[in-house]
Image: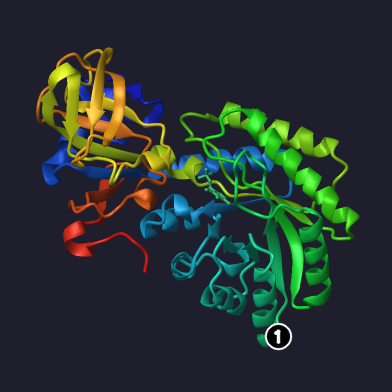
Amino acid sequence: MIKLKKISGNPYVNKKEGNTLIDTILVNDILRNSTTPLMIFLENRIRDNINSFCRVFKSVFKNFQCFYSFKANFLPEICKIIQSEGIGAELIGLPELNLALKLQFPPKKIIVGGPYLPHDLIEKCIKENIKEIIVYNLNDLIQINSIAKNYHKIQNICIRINSQKFGSKLGIVLDKSKLIKLTNLVKECENIRLTTILSHYSTQMNNFGQFKKNIESLIENIKILSDAGINVENINLGGGFPEAVIMPETQLREIANNIYSVLSNSEFNFKNIYFEPGRYFIGDAGIFLAKIIKVSEDRWIFLDIGNHICPKFARCSLRFYNASKINEPHKFKTSIAGIVPTDQDVLAKNYFFTKDLKENDIVMVTNVGAYTLTFSNRFPYTLPKIILVKNRTITEIFDPLRNYDFSLI
Ligand SMILES: Cc1ncc(COP(=O)(O)O)c(C=O)c1O
């Protein structure tokens, strides 16, 4: 029996006799049919992450519902895997809604909303009987009500409150004037029903303190609403969990238990609790294979990917490995630059890497599954090919020469 050694804490990325194994395929075998840069998704890891998340939250909350935040990664093949696990969808725009419906997410498992709700998006939500529209701006309620009236329907609404994280501008601050406005709108608008309140706090939240602040702010707002005679049924705590390798199941369970106790200590009884994870499902299921294209002074290496496809904005827990020398100690400080011709394209500074640095060495970058494609930009380089790996099977899910662009239309 050959011993495997986990890389990056990921059970689907291993060392095997000096080689790197992705699921059950050697990196060298993957690169026989593809060149770098290459993006790889691990189907089994996505499924495992979904199962861990649901196992934990279902066991803690009997009334738990889960909606995958499409913006984390909206590749149709990825969303299809998530749909097949019975998860719902959290969407921000019409292109995502069209995709979710095409992939047969049931409308009763779709929630849609954000800071920008154009008429055609609201109309489609109402026509398709979407579970909830999430509103960040009270004025949107007027438009939703009027479209719902035209269709003789009553639309369920969730309001996103501003979680008051320092500097946050998203969502509604329920001050006196907004509260009066909301109370009047709820009375006047007969074709909407305020059912849910959402507070999404931040990203990469790896300690309970941040979740606690979010819940406290939510409870405070529920009280404000209740004093004004508005009673919501459901709470939505948003997403914000880190990659599953960063928060393994035991730690996730601790967070879930703590959320449960803070909520139980408030006197508020809610019907359902929703979460909208994005990164937790998909973050550590994505890998880049890149190549060193130049080794320069002071241990700087340049890769054939950069911030256009692996952007800082994505806030990934990036890890770098020399896949060509995977058995060598990674303990020599190395700085890693990207391909974009600006000195600002730095992927990592003083990262522990192999002593030997050679052009054409293959560099594996892990934890790149969430938000990299979303925040990528159209710096005019060819996009990488994207493959999906499951056991011994490789499926090409994006080829820039065939598909041109992975954006939704
Ligand atoms: C309202 C809302 N819900 C869910 C998410 C998903 O967050 P994450 O991928 O950090 O779980 C986001 C991300 O920005 C968000 O804004």
Task: Pick the quarter of the image with the C terminus.
Answer: bottom left
Q: Residue at x 75, y 38 (%)?
A: 216
Q: Quadrant of the N terminus?
A: top left
| Residue at mark 1 | 152
Q: Where residue 62 sits in the image (x, y, percent)?
A: 74, 46
Q: Residue at x 90, y 54 (%)?
A: 227
**Which residue lies at the image location 65% right of the left edge and 69% below the top edge?**
140
Q: Residue 332: where, in percent of width, then height?
A: 25, 13
Q: Where's residue 259, x and y in %? A: 71, 35
Lateral position of residue 20 relative to residue 129, left or right: left
Quadrant housing residue 126: bottom right
131 lies above or below 31 = below
Along the viewing direction, whichever of 106 and 72 lies nearer the viewer: 72
Q: Amino acid at mark 1?
A: His
Check mark 1 vs ligand 1: CB closer than 8 Å? yes or no. Answer: no
Residue 89: name its quadrant. Answer: bottom right
Q: Considering depth in this image, is 150 or 249 the residue closer to the camera?
A: 150
